[in-house]
Image (cartoon, helix red, strand yellow):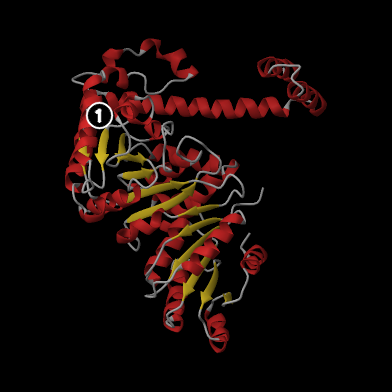
Amino acid sequence: MDWVAAALAGDRRAIARLMTLVEEDGEAARAVTAQLFPHTGRAHVIGVTGAPGAGKSTLVNELARAYRSEGRRVGVVAVDASSPFSGGALLGDRIRMRDVADARDVFVRSMASRGHLGGLARTTPGVVRVLDAAGYDPIIVETVGAGQLEVEIAQLAHTVIVVDIPGAGDDIQSIKAGIVEIADIFVVNKADRDGADRTQAILEAMLEMGSPAARTHSRAVGMLMEACSVAESAASVSGAPWRPPVLKTIAVRGAGIPELVHAIASHREHLQSSGEDARRNRARLIAEVERELHHRLLRQLVAGLDHHCLNDVLNEVTAHRLDPASAAERLQHAAG
Amino acid sequence: MAATVRVLIAKLGLDGHDRGAKVVARALRDAGMEVIYTGLRQTPEMVAEAALQEDVDVVGLSMLSGAHLSLLPRLVELLRERGMDDVLILAGGIIPAEHVPRLQELGVDAVFGPGASTQEIVDFIRAHVRQ
């Protein structure tokens, strides 16, 4: 059976099988991605991130319901953590997504992080791509319960929603670097709890303090990006910068969801009219090329190394006679 | 490296007791499997659709309500309709011994009642999961 053709035609079993292939991350995955790639780049990808227990899954359930009622086919990719000990995982995001559980026009896929840090699995972009090629739009990606540095979602999603809850920290937490910087939309969920207004005010004040321009221009960094970004100037993005709205929701009751859907649409509109969309897409794809290059070069280098030599060098490092950077240099020459 | 085994654990029907299902889910996780837990009060349609979308190798159902003779065959039928005939189907909970042959005839691969160890379940999955 030609799974790719079937998936492109919307066959759900084929879509699910391709996702498994992509997740296993072997040669077959590469072939599949190569075939799917020309059909991708159409869906609006919405990222939902925030601390464990903030209500991400419940919010995703509500968003999926809202988009579905507009007649759209919605993709959901929910990432949970793999156990660092057994490699197994308990993926529980579906528990909160019961309103869309038997819907054929909502495709929900749970993923384990499989040792990858950053809030997603290594193959999450590939799994999103399968849904994109199959015509799902929007695609909502829920990260693992995130702390401060799980910011990879910013590279995958067009619109990032950071979910906070009342009383989760003082105002210094909100001006630290990291996750609060990547939000296109802030949601204060569980807004019926005490302190919701204060949390909203803290986030608003944080946004007043910062310069939005600083946000838009440092989103993706990488060696390839730096090497090729000479030609790309700030002029490629026009108009007023986006100011992230801070919305209150009570996701379990569906309160605030229409406003959130509206804010997502406004952000998408902004991305398209300002040229920011093209810039982000470019940054995202270049970053992906860099990751692949990194992966291939390292694999090639390791394949070219003599085992004894590798052992000797690593033993020197563990005995504290050779520093890691010098060891890397020596291995690079040895493989050369 | 062998492909990761993915398992769906669900409570089919209306009883609200999921301690057993959670214990099994946890044990399979600790055995290195990826377990998708869907929670309480699932219909056969919900379970079949989840199994399809998640492309699981195993579906494990916990039932204490006595409705297994009506709900399990319906689920098996829905899975087959979706082309998922190579998925291992396991049932657990309170299922009278005299019903087991009937269920196996209908396509349930194994039934683990009270007293079954989680290791038995892990071993059964390892031995019978599709390759």
Which quadrant of the figure has residue B78?
bottom left
At label 1, which amino acid type do we have?
A: Leu
What residue occupies the far top of the structure in this picture? A230
Decide if residue A83 is in sight here: yes
Where is residue A227 drawn, in percent x and y?
47, 13
Label 1: which secondary element: helix
Q: Is residue A27 above or below residue A110?
A: above
Q: Is residue B107 left or right of residue A282?
A: right
Q: Is residue A80 left or right of residue A294?
A: left
Where is residue A66 drawn, in percent x and y?
22, 52
Where is residue A165 drawn, in percent x and y?
29, 42
Residue name at image x 53 percent, y 47 percent: A82
Determine which residue is flagged by label 1.
Answer: A271
Q: Is residue A143 above or below residue B38?
A: above
Residue name at image x 46 percent, y 79 percent: B73
Which quadrant of the figure has residue B89?
bottom right
Where is residue B68 drawn, in percent x and y?
45, 80
Quadrant for the C terminus of chain B, please.
bottom right
